[in-house]
Image (spheres, rainbow, N blue to C red):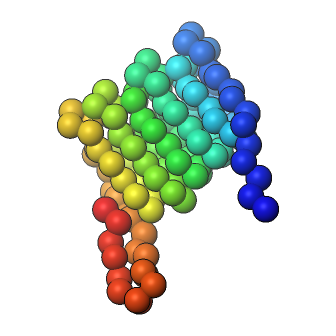
Amino acid sequence: MKNNSTNLSIIDKELSIEGTISSKGSLVIKGTVKGTLVGETVILAKEGSVFAKTTVASMTIGGVFEGEIHASDELVILSTGNCSGKVSCKDITVEKGGVLNAEVTCTVVKDSKNKIEFNA
């Protein structure tokens, strides 16, 4: 049975956190995070910034991200987002206006007929 977490955590504007953050459920970042970030669903708001080594299931970037991202599922960079560093993910989406200046590695998936598909 899959355990779907419904937790919601917010790092609000004017809040700055340095160190290691581990989050279950959804984490919305409107402030600043520096260090290490581990979580399920992370949403970096337009006014937020993250300077971290990050391991998540999915991440949406609307603010400034610098560092490393390992997203086991997806990475979405919104039109207001700016991502730099190193990225590893299954699927990636960059909206028009979004900035991606990173070394990017997308995982390779085999479909049911053993054909190789690149999810980039």
Name the residue rendered at 64%, 46% in the picture: 40
Name the residue rendered at 36%, 53% in the picture: 92
Q: Which residue lies furthest to the bottom in this view?
A: 114
Residue 7 left/right relative to 85: right
Question: Where's the C terminus, which quadrant?
Answer: bottom left
- Report which quarter residue 29 is drawn in: top right
Residue 43 left/right relative to 109: right
Regarding residue 20, the answer to whether it shows in the image is: no
How far across and down, in percent of the image, does residue 10 sit? 64, 22
How far across and down, in percent of the image, does residue 15 sit? 61, 14
Above or below — where is 15 with respect to 118? above
Question: Where's the N terminus, which quadrant?
Answer: bottom right
Name the residue nearer the viewer: 58 or 32: 58
Name the residue rendered at 65%, 44% in the picture: 39
How far across and down, in percent of the image, does residue 2 sit? 74, 58
Regarding residue 46, the answer to whether it shows in the image is: yes
Above or below — where is 53 with respect to 27? below
- Report which quarter residue 41 is drawn in: top right
